[in-house]
Amino acid sequence: MTESPAPPLQPVPDDMTSFFWDAARRHELHLQHCSSCGTYQHPPEPVCSSCLSFDLGGAPVSGRGTVYSYEMATQAFHPAFADKLPLCIAVIELDDQPGLKILSNIIDLPADGVSVGDRVEVCFNDLSDTIALPVFRLARA
Ligand SMILES: [Zn+2]
C-alpha cells in the first residue's frame, strides 16, 4: 500500500489574526500594535500587555531583526514536514522594538548554518493563493 502525501498544514486566520495573514499575503509583515501606547506585541492578544488598552490593530514592521534563539529540527513530528528537514526553527527579535520577538523559520541557510546574533530579514513562503507564511533568511549585506 502506498501512502498518499500528507496534506499541507496551513494557518487558519481568525478575527484576531486576519490582519497578520492579510498583510502576509501581500508579502508585508504587520504585527499587532496598540494605538494608545504605541507598543507592538506578538502573538496578538485581546488586550495590550503594556497599557491594558483594547485599541489594537495591525501595523507594519521592518521585517529585519536578529536571531535570538534557534533549533535545527531533524525529525518530522508531522508528515507534512518530512520533506523540509533539516528545518531551522528560530526566535527572531525584530528591530522595531526591544523584546519584540516572532517565532518563525530561517530558510536558505548556508553550509555553515546560522548563529545567535545573525542578522535576518523577512521573506514569504506562498503556501496557497490565500496564505503566505512569513519566514526569514540571512540578511544580505
Ligand atoms: Zn498599549
Image (spheres, rainbow, N blue to C red):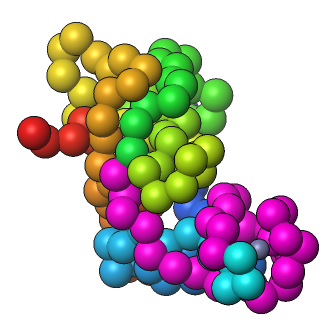
Residue 51 spot, x, y in % from top left: 85, 71
109 and 62: which is toward the camera: 62
Q: Tell which residue pokes out farthest to the right in this image.
A: 52
Which picture quadrant has residue 32? Answer: bottom right
* The residue stretch that appears in magenta: 38-64
Ligand 1's quadrant is bottom right
Q: Residue at x 49, y 40 (%)?
A: 92
Q: Residue at x 39, y 45 (%)?
A: 65
| Left or right of 115 on screen, residue 17 | right
Which picture quadrant has residue 9? Answer: bottom right
| Left or right of 107 on screen, residue 3 | right
Q: Residue at x 31, y 41 (%)?
A: 120
50 in relation to 13, above or below: above
134 and 29: which is toward the camera: 29
Examine the rendering and report whether any part of residue 108 can be seen. Answer: yes
Which picture quadrant has residue 66? Answer: top left
In the rendered structure, does residue 53 fall within the stretch colored magenta? yes
| Left or right of 16 on screen, residue 65 | left
105 in relation to 122, above or below: above
Residue 30 spot, x, y in % from top left: 49, 73
Examine the rendering and report whether any part of residue 86 can be seen. Answer: no
In the rendered structure, does residue 3 fall within the stretch colored magenta? no
95 and 63: which is toward the camera: 95
